[in-house]
Image (tube, grey):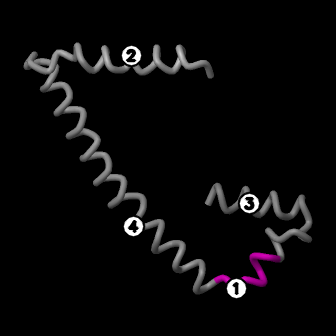
Amino acid sequence: MKEWKKFLYIAIIFLGCFYLPIENLRFTNAIFEALALVKWYAREHVLLCLVPAFFIAGAISVFVSQASVMKYFGAKANKFLSYSAFQMVQKG
């Protein structure tokens, strides 16, 4: 990339940040509400998706042997059988 293009990108980003209407109450409220929404989504996502996923992964690692996993998903597995097992797991 040429030097003048890099400078142009930096200048555009700087001017965009320089002229942000941060003194406008409507703009700052929109930014705060967007951040609050991201915070809420992160909390909900962690509680409703990640924690159960960790428990499910732990249960799979305890109750399903590595040999059976390699049988269906290993390098020497039958491709048709592997794909169909993956589809059943994905739908279940």
Measuring from the top left, give residue 91's x and y in whole percent: 64, 55
Frontmost of labels 3 and 2 is: 2
Quickly name the residue at label 1: 65
N-terminal-most mark, 3 or 4: 4
Q: Nearer the viewer, residue 75 or 77?
A: 75
Q: Secondary structure at mark 1?
A: loop
Quarter of the figure with residue 1: top right
**Alpha carbon separation for disc pair 1 and 3:** 16 Å
Q: Earlier in the sequence, mark 1 or mark 2?
A: 2
Q: Amino acid at mark 1?
A: Ser
The residue indicated by pointer 2 is 11
Which residue type carries mark 4? Val
Residue under label 3: 86
In magenta, the rendered stretch is: 64-70
Q: Earlier in the sequence, mark 1 or mark 3?
A: 1
Secondary-structure class at tag 3: helix
